[in-house]
Amino acid sequence: MIPDKPPQDNVFHGSEELKKEAHVPSFDKYRELYMKSVDNPDEFWGDVAKDFFWKTKHTGQFLDYNFDVTKGEIYIKCMEGASTNICYNLLDRNVHEKKLADKVAFFWEGNDPGDELTVTYRELLQRVCQFANVLKAQGVKKGDRVSIYMPMVVELVVAMLACVRIGAVHSIVFAGFSAESLCERIVDSQCCLLITADGFYRGDKLINLKLLADEALQKCRDKGFPVGRCIMLKHLSKEPEGIVGSQSPPAKRPCPDLQQEKQAGRVKKTRPVPKVPWNPEVDLCWDALLRGVSDECEPEWCDSEDPLFILYTSGSTGKPKGVLHTVSGYMLYTATTFKVVFDHQPDDVYWCTADIGWITGHSYITYGPLANGATSVLFEGLPTHPDVSRMWEIVDKYNVTKFYTAPTAIRLLMKFGNEPVQRYKRSSLKVLGTVGEPINPEAWQWYYNVVGEKRCPIVDTFWQTETGGHVLTPLPAATPMKPGSATLPFFGVVPAILNESGEELEGPSEGYLVFKQPWPGVMRTVYGSHERFESTYFKKFPGYYVTGDGCRRDKDGYFWVTGRIDDMLNVSGHLLSTAEVESALVEHEAVAEAAVVGRPHPVKGESLYCFVTLNDGVMYNSELEAELKKQVREKIGAIATPDYIQNAPGLPKTRSGKIMRRLLRKIACDERELGDISTLADSTVVEQLFQNRCCTAV
Ligand code: PRX
């Protein structure tokens, strides 16, 4: 299962100093705990659960499940019979029981240096309770879905935990997604309310979020799903004139003059303020709603398997899947992975650069760190704004000890050389982490040698929106590291590698990465479609959870995730489905057919290479190209913007009409070794496409 002994050759080790204080100080200890977690999960997780507050205790076994579609419905239940509230465990327990009231929960660092805010656990609890009361006053009840579309501000955490406090289910939509994507997600999860902000800056670019939110709500109305209320936080605008439009806010729902509001620390720089349309029928102002509202709110006690949140991830059919996580298992799993993988210590300052709109931000900015009473940096900005030293400046400013980012960010910064890093000391750093895609050894070495100065182990954490938390990962003081390998399973996780016929491969091998049994944090269903949950993850190989990733195991038993083996692309650590981009392209009136493949990219990992076949009589030109790019941005969001678009009068198809994507990938990369093309209906198409390849990104 896992090796008896740690590998000796070509490995990197955590520092002796780290081993002294670590929760898991050696490979032997990791092995012992791992064996306990799989042989006796009840006892292992039961010990973890002791540190949390339970209104009622669980009865029966810790995990109950069926992973085999041939034996009936797939289900995973953890701690049945127990009831708790995660918000209570994250905040009240830390404030009252752990005496952390005055400890900083978040150092908020805005887009522009100098914009900052500090929030303690006590303040966070008060603000969450107050906003929870606001939601209740708006009629939000346990089980209702609330959509959140906000920038990286403290109020985003407040909004999500306020939902959790009253048992409502949050569905956060990354603020980089388009109005169309937001609408699709609101309708799919039938949200009763939207929480957003006026706007925000990404570097020097203004994102007029409220405009996008309004557009999304209009689209929802057009689809026959009117959302009654939209709460807007004034993040940028300080003056009441910031809110303009056909109608100003009516007296009964005033938007306050924020000069009178406590504005400590909000965006100070004078930047242009967005003009915000205001619809008095729907819009409500965050600050106005809070006036005079109590900051005490009794938590709603939830059953272990009550829904906690929905988070959408790309699906290979093109329609995003609403991944559903539930209360107790997710809480225990994110808390434990955070504590052990980052080796959390009480005086740490932890910084995860992800956006809360993705699972990394859910699990490792909000839930895991707060469950451990950690102090985190919450960063609104970009690694390159105002310059490419920003990350390291922030590390020194807050004395960050544990730092977690994505390979794409490392590759981006690596391009600028060592000097911007070395301008800052970074002596506080102890552990570095990566997530989102395989890290290439060159980027790993740079991260290790230059950023961490050979002192800090790198935890290359493999996981997914669906897994809730890390599933393959080194532990910083226990697992020898190999650059590019996510190494070994976390506690409770039993990986296997299968061949095409579904047979488990032993020893060094390569194939499908699957998991044989659940761990507490694994997703429970696809919201609104349990059938889709079963068919996506459990049908291909009955008895296993199928990740969709390919994987190699080396002679030491280490896992090397090689990337997606379905129709998904990983662009800058974000999963996109080719079908989703294709359907955005064919919605354009000029396009008859589209096929999208990934092309390796030095910073983003993969870039989008799109082949489009135009309708008869339509001419391909640069204006059309720009329109197509815009079309995809508007349908999905900026992350899906095509890098290359090629006019393809014909696509390589088999005689049965199936597009041979394998060949398109070769064309995109200009690789002439085509393999067997005997099943092609018309092989001349391939040569034509090679001749018209795009060499430069659009
Ligand atoms: O392909 C794997 C890749 O990201 C996918 C999951 O994407 P998402 O659900 O958006 O969650 C990303 C953040 C957890 C996986 O199926 N992936 C993630 N981490 C790694 C990785 N591939 C290799 N190594 C990793 N450390």
Image (cartoon, helix red, strand yellow):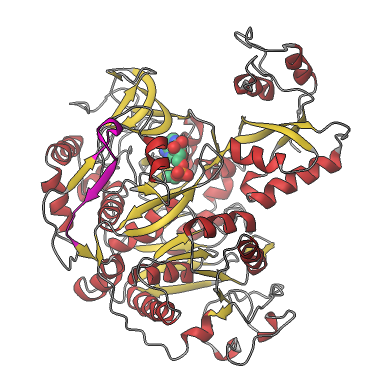
- How many labels sit on residues? 0
Q: Is residue 12 above or below residue 423?
A: above
Residue for point 16% across, 49% down: 62
Q: Is residue 689 magenta?
A: no
Indicate left or right for 339 with 578 as reference. Answer: left
**Where is residue 24 drawn, in percent x and y?**
20, 44
**Where is residue 466 drawn, in percent x and y?**
39, 45
Q: Quadrant of the N terminus?
A: top left
Q: Say whether residue 41 is visible.
A: yes
Locate ligand 1 by image quadrant.
top left
Q: Is residue 156 above or below residue 467?
A: below
**Where is residue 258 drawn, in percent x and y?**
59, 86
Q: Quadrant of the C terminus?
A: top right
Indicate left or right for 391 with 359 as reference. Answer: right
Residue for point 56% across, 91% down: 260
202 vs 575, nearest the viewer = 575
Q: Is residue 74 magenta?
A: yes
Residue for point 25% across, 36% down: 517
Q: Is residue 120 above or below residue 16?
A: below
**Where is residue 657 drawn, in percent x and y?**
65, 20
Q: Say whether residue 605 is visible.
A: no
Residue for point 33% across, 68% down: 167
User: Dividing the picture into quarters, in which one does residue 4 lie?
Assistant: top left
393 vs 217, nearest the viewer = 217
Indicate left or right for 126 with 696 as reference. Answer: left
User: Dividing the picture into quarters, in which one does residue 94 lie?
Assistant: bottom left
Q: Which residues are magenta?
A: 66-82
Indicate left or right for 288 with 403 as reference. Answer: right
